[in-house]
């Protein structure tokens, strides 16, 4: 009997905690940070927001400029590789053209 009562109290506590958490988390997203939230949820929200903005805040100007330079070099490398591939394809087409079409142009049709 005591075990059933204890299990019921634990389940009610868990359900109420989950409902409160959902209520306050939705309220924070809809209206903004509310003044009546529990400290646990405020800490959780702060950690969540810090995690979202960690990439912007933790980046120095040097790291940002290095990243931009790396992106620029990568774009330039991609462009050069595309040009090299285009030239290679053009040379391959020219070789096929010379192999297959040129012999026919050298043959004279006699009527």
Image: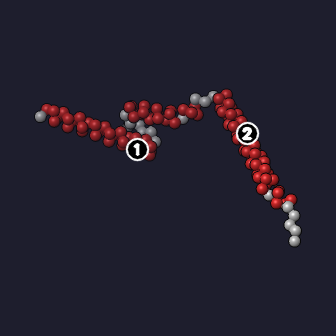
When the figure is inspected, residue 40 is found, relative to residue 92, above or below; the finding is above
Going by the picture, which residue comes out furthest to the bottom? 111
**Percent x, y for residue 98?**
81, 53
Query: What residue sits 82% from the left and 57% below the top?
Result: 103
Going by the picture, which residue comes out furthest to the front? 110
Which residue is identified by label 1?
26
Tell me which corner region of the image, top left, top right, bottom left or bottom right, holds residue 63: top right
Tell me which corner region of the image, top left, top right, bottom left or bottom right, holds residue 1: top left
Q: Of callouts 1 and 2, which one flags the residue occurring earlier in the amino acid sequence?
A: 1
Tell me which corner region of the image, top left, top right, bottom left or bottom right, holds residue 24: top left
Query: What residue sits 28% from the left and 40% below the top?
Result: 15
The answer to whether one can see residue 70 in this image is yes
**Percent x, y for residue 65?**
68, 32
Q: From the image, which quarter does the C terminus lie in?
A: bottom right
Which residue is identified by label 2?
76
Question: Which class describes the residues within 10 Å of circle 2: few (<14), some (14-19), or many (20+)?
Answer: few
The answer to whether one can see residue 61 in this image is no
Check disc 1 and report its element: helix, strand or loop. helix
Q: Which mark is residue 106?
A: none
Query: What residue sits 20% from the left and 37% below the top?
Result: 8
Label 1 to label 2: alpha-carbon separation? 46 Å
């Amino acid at each position: 009997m005591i075990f059933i009562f204890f299990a019921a109290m634990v389940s009610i506590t868990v359900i109420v905690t989950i409902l409160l958490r959902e209520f306050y988390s939705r309220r924070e997203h809809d209206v903004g940070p509310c003044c009546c939230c529990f400290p646990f949820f405020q800490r959780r929200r702060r950690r969540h927001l810090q995690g979202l903005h960690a990439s912007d805040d933790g980046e120095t100007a040097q790291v940002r400029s290095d990243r931009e330079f790396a992106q620029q070099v990568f774009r330039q490398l991609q462009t050069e590789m595309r040009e090299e591939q285009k030239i290679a394809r053009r040379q391959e087409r020219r070789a096929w053209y010379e192999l297959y079409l040129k012999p026919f142009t050298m043959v004279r049709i006699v009527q």
